[in-house]
Amino acid sequence: MPSRKKRFFSLLSAVCLALTLPLTALAAETQTQAPARALSAQAADGAREETLANALAYIFAHVPEPAFGTEWSVLALARAEYPAPDYYSRYFDKIAAYVRQNGSARLDRSRVTENARLILALSSLGLDATDVGGYNLLTPMADLSFITRQGLNGPVFALLALDTNAYEIPADDSAADPATREKIIDYILHREIQRDTDKAGGFALSGSAPDPDMTGMVLQALAPYRNQPPVAAAIDRALAALSGIQEDDGGFSFRGAANAESISQVVVALTALGIDPAADPRFVKKNGDPITALLRFAVDGGGFRHTRTGEVNGMATDQGAYALAAYDRFRNGKNSLYDMRDAFGSPDPPSTGTTAPGTPTDDPTRSTQQGALPFDDVTAADWFYEAVTYMQSTGLMRGTGAAKFAPNASLTRAMFVTILHRREDEPAAAGPAAFPDVTDGRWYTAAAAWAGAAGLVSGYGDGRFGPDDDVTREQVAVILYHYAAWKDLDTSAAADLAGCADADSVSGWALPAVRWAVAKGLLTGRAAGMLAPKSTATRAEVAVLLMRFFTLSA
């Protein structure tokens, strides 16, 4: 097989937005009229949905060729699930070319936010930031001294980017001060306004008074860690500070000017914390709440103004759109705006720890008790629950650590063939493993030798098996295709992939297997026509695919 590449495309579902109320009815309302929150629930929802639909259409029309620098536009469209797979594919191709031309994982000499912003956009599309144009965009985040060069802005955006897909901070021997999540969080907490006094509360990029923008962004970054007592206390104080500086119409000002962006950051923050901006009594003021306040900046026909009297503003439009998308996601029980694991096919709730959840151990053959599902990271509400239950109860997949299944973690090639070997009651191979990188005495040695002898795997072009390489979705299809043939099952089915937007990215050597796997209903897209063949397969995805195969072939 050729060398693996990690290109992750999320399968983005189509959006159906109800259009029920003309924006002019809301935009014309003034503070002297009845408060916006007095509108009926149906009318308020209609205004919000129409505003979001118009803003997304405006972005799509006015940013026709997305490239580096348009990340917030791409993120807004993607997190609102705007159906534009070709658009997103063109964006990634340009980004990969840009990073290659840059010649380094560090996109700016002193600003980590350049990397963080790009990671946010890529993650919103389900694209892996660890291999873009041959570079790991997370590498600059290994050095705390680099992250903090921008003051509070850098650590906040770095933490948001890292947590989009529970990325691990990469090791970098050249880092002056190796970064950890704990260090980043501690840096942020120590920048609280009037920290350690009875007036503590809120954050600011500069100055001694909390501003809504930076306070909102800090809350967004800290939201996944709110079960930690120091973080929880800082969040409570920040929320009190925001409520205290909120205006009577529900909006917010920055340096004396009421604006859409400040409101947007607060909306994103509140939804990340599970707080309804339109219902929480701390944020429903005399003449409105943050949602109705934001809608007053909407422009008829699409877009948002920066101020009430301005023209359509690009930044205000991006932020207004993704703020409404965040609220829509909140209302519909979806992952928060920056918890983007759903874009990678794993719609889990946010992590509340300080390390990436579900890191697997070297040996997946550890035993776990059977019967009741022994994993605290899998619940009955998860889309993969039935598959995990099946795979665990049959002993084919086991935990990765104490009470962990790690559904979002990747699976290595060695792990995958070990599952199939276990399914066959661990038969002995005719001889030693034919792969130079499979040595005697490893937990996967017997499985790799059997898989090679049975023709399930043939290795890379240089003869290596690559036991520790993450298995990709198309590699899973190929190995399973060969496994089915080894079991004398019919492998003649072949789906037409014309409806898959990324069909051209399937490797030629994998095409028959992928077509078969799609035809049998084993391999499905991550969303709206995207197969993501070169994406790393997660443990949850493998569990679902194998359950389908084993039950179909039983």
Image (tube, rainbow, N blue to C red):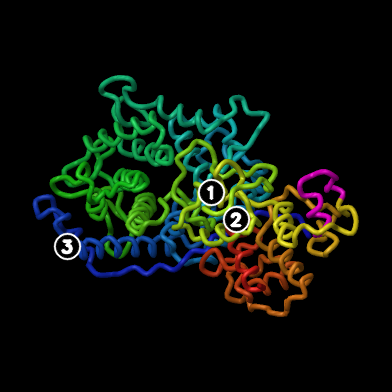
Do the residues under discs 1 and 2 have CB atoms within 8 angstroms?
Answer: yes
Do the residues under discs 3 and 2 have CB atoms within 8 angstroms?
Answer: no
Residue 400, above or below 207: below
Q: Quadrant of the N terminus?
A: bottom right
Q: Nearer the viewer, mark 3 or mark 2?
A: 2
N-terminal of the pair, mark 3 or mark 2, is 3
Locate residue 103, reporting x and y percent: 67, 43
The residue that mark 2 highlights is 392
Q: Which structural element holds mark 2? A: helix
- Identity of the residue drawn at 66% across and 69% down: 504
Locate residue 219, reporting x and y percent: 37, 38
Q: Label 1 vs label 2: CA separation? A: 9 Å
Q: Residues within 10 Å of mark 1 (few under 14, many from 20)?
A: some
The residue that mark 1 highlights is 374
Q: Which residues are magenta?
A: 436-451
* Residue 182 counted in the magenta span: no
Q: Which structural element holds mark 1? A: loop
Q: Residues within 10 Å of mark 3 (few under 14, many from 20)?
A: few
Locate residue 357, reporting x and y percent: 54, 43
Q: Amino acid at mark 3?
A: Ser
The residue that mark 3 highlights is 40
Q: Amino acid at mark 2?
A: Gln
Q: Label 1 vs label 3: CA separation? A: 46 Å
Q: Which structural element holds mark 3? A: loop
- Identity of the residue drawn at 69% across and 55% down: 471
Residue furthest top in the image: 197
In the depicted view, which residue is nearer to us: 271 or 379? 379
Q: Amino acid at mark 1?
A: Pro
Q: Viewed as shown, does residue 276 lie left or right of 408? A: left
In the rendered structure, find residue 395 and report the number of the disc placed on it.
Answer: none
- Identity of the residue drawn at 17% across and 54% down: 37
